[in-house]
Amino acid sequence: MSEKSGKYDWYQTNCSMPIFLIVILLGVLVTTGFGCKWQSKEVKESMKPVELTYWRVWDNKDAFKEIIEDFKAIHPNISISYKKLRYEEYEDVLLNALAEDRGPDIFSIHNTWLRKYKDKISPLPETITLPHTVLKGTIKKETAVELKTTRSLNSKNLKNDFIDLVSKDAVIPEKIKNPETGKQEEVEKIYGLPLSVDTLVLFCNRDLLNNAGISRVPQNWQDFQEDVKKLTKFDKEGNIISSGAAIGTSKNVDRFTDILSVLMMQNGAQITDEQNYATFHLMPKELKGLREIIPGAEALIFYTDFANPAKEVYTWNEEMPNSLDAFIQGQVAFFFGYSYHLPIIKARAPKLNFVTSEMPQITGNKEFNFANYWVETVSKKTEHPNEAWEFIQFMTSRPKEAEKYLKATKRPTALRELIATQLDDVDLGVFAEELLTAQSWYRGKNPEAMEKTFTEMIEEALKGEKKLKKIVEIAAGKVNQTIK
């Protein structure tokens, strides 16, 4: 066999085409500058189709349409199957599905549930290796696939890119054994990332304020108290016929736990310690000798005074309707709510003349606002943790992608970079204004039990049969039973 015939045999064996076609093809490739490249076995394996299931509560698939398309352009082998569930059934369905190994790869949970779900979550890995579609070439661009290893977000990135609250909630320290030294070392792991962060604000019925001669929304809690006195109307029997504010009780006040919590924070209470145990029943070190009543109890007094008939600011009671319903029906002037209440109010009362204002503060004290948000996380049982976390990072930490979700849903941002873009927004500006001072707190592994405890604390305070300090101590003790 000649050298020439040997080359011919090689082409026949490896490329399975006649020699004259090989010559023509080589000529074309040389002139175009694009060489014949066979993908490695590793790249081929990584390009196998992957379908990720994604469960959430609040948004329709349309909110993620553009983001999913952008992600697929980079990772064409990854598909996202999105499912929206009703809030009332979500947690039960999710827990049952995870227990039976038929749960989603990616799911959304409330920020206060993170430690409760910790054992069911696969934390964000330090690095992620996945195939990426990239453009190659200088003059003539060609699409190619490369296997890339990229560093994931870390706690430093979270502090730099997201508002302060996110790193506090999403980063959970863990003790692991160092294989080299054999010693226990603490490492920080990220368990979830948010698409947005909502904040608690004051909704004001402009017509009721105008009728009472109130020209501007309250700037602080003292203004708020004075306005409530002017706005509350009683009949001859002393029954409330028009309320100044929906505050003071528990069961008929939306997010009453958040309102009372932020009052405690504003008043100087330390809600939890570094181990996440409730400490709102204690006098903070910096206030010892300066106050007689613990700030947590003072906040409880302030809150319940609005539902106490013996007080000047009496404006609400347990017989009143749900606070949101009352605001929509024009029965109450002030309502505390979040941005997700906006579309509800506008849909049910399109002619209601209302405005939103920042949460009142205590004059002279440090500013505190309250956050309420959900995070996206990855199931511990997923077969594709890298692909799932890559998608979460893609949509939450890239401003251009996150902005697509925010515009579609009209929600406040979680990214520092995007706050300025929302400040002038008619609807979102007031919520964005509060983001940098927004706080939250861990409510234990049973948030429902914590809510029940706060209900009991408020009801006991309204009865007036026990000392406030004792009521708050009992409440903190019950919350702490579910911390670990």
Image (cartoon, rainbow, N blue to C red):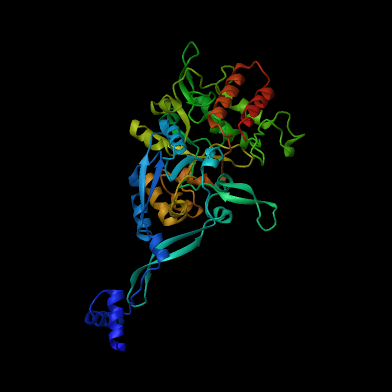
Residue at the (30%, 84%) spot, across then down:
6
Residue 321: horizontal and vertical position, in percent?
44, 21
Residue 78, by quadrant, is: bottom left
Judged left or right of residue 452, residue 29 is left
Is 481 situated above or below 16?
A: above
- Where does residue 320 sit, x and y in percent of width and height? 46, 20
Can residue 349 be seen in this snapshot?
no
Is residue 173 visible from the viewing direction of this image? yes
Residue appearing at x 40%, y 39% in the figure: 58
Image quadrant containing the C terminus: top right
| Residue farthest front in this picture | 1
Number of marks present in the image shown: 0
Farthest residue toward the right?
A: 289
Residue 166 lies, in percent from the top left, at: 54, 47
Q: Closest to the observer: 467 or 376?
A: 376
> In the rendered view, would you say 329 is above or below 147?
above
Q: Residue at x 42, y 34 (%)?
A: 93
Which quarter of the figure has residue 290? top right
Q: Residue at x 37, y 39 (%)?
A: 84
Give how far across and how far down residue 99 sits, in percent. 47, 36
Question: Quadrant of the image for the N terminus?
Answer: bottom left
